[in-house]
Image (tube, rainbow, N blue to C red):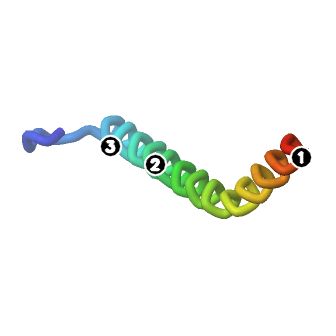
Amino acid sequence: MLDGEPVRGEEIEKAKNGANALNRLVRAYSDHQAALLKAQSARTLLDQVLSFNSAN
């Protein structure tokens, strides 16, 4: 496909499907990272509460 050969419709569809799957994976990873960032303050607070409770 990259060497200039003609590409059949089936190969184009496979490439599109692969690109779409990769796009979904990148979007899911980005969403996951954003969720982790948003949850970090709650996790820090939970860690403080748990360490306070175990110290008492």
User: How many C-alpha atoms fall within 10 Å of the one at disc 3: few (<14), some, or many (≥20)?
Assistant: few
The residue that appears at 21% across and 40% down in the rendered structure is 7
Q: Are discs 3 and 2 less than 8 Å apart at CB?
A: no
Residue 54 against residue 29 in the figure, above or below: above
User: How many C-alpha atoms fall within 10 Å of the one at disc 2: few (<14), some, or many (≥20)?
Assistant: few
Q: Secondary structure at mark 2?
A: helix
Q: Quadrant of the C terminus?
A: top right
Where residue 9 appears, as percent x and y from the top left, is: 32, 41
Question: Which sits in the foreground, 26 or 14?
Answer: 26
The residue that appears at 84% across and 50% down in the rendered structure is 52
Q: Name the residue type under label 1.
A: Asn
Question: Which sits in the foreground, 25 or 13?
Answer: 25
Q: Quadrant of the N terminus?
A: top left
Where residue 43 appears, as percent x and y from the top left, is: 73, 53
Q: Earlier in the sequence, mark 1 or mark 2?
A: 2
The residue that appears at 56% across and 54% down in the rendered structure is 33
Which is more foreground, mark 1 or mark 2?
1
Q: CA distance from mark 1 to mark 3?
A: 59 Å
Where residue 31 appears, as percent x and y from the top left, is: 59, 56
Residue named by callout 2: 20
Which is more foreground, mark 3 or mark 2?
2
Where residue 50 appears, as percent x and y from the top left, is: 83, 46
Residue named by callout 1: 53
User: How many C-alpha atoms fall within 10 Å of the one at disc 1: few (<14), some, or many (≥20)?
Assistant: few
Q: CA distance from mark 3 to mark 2?
A: 12 Å
Residue named by callout 3: 12
Q: Name the residue type under label 2.
A: Asn
| 39 on left or right of 14 | right
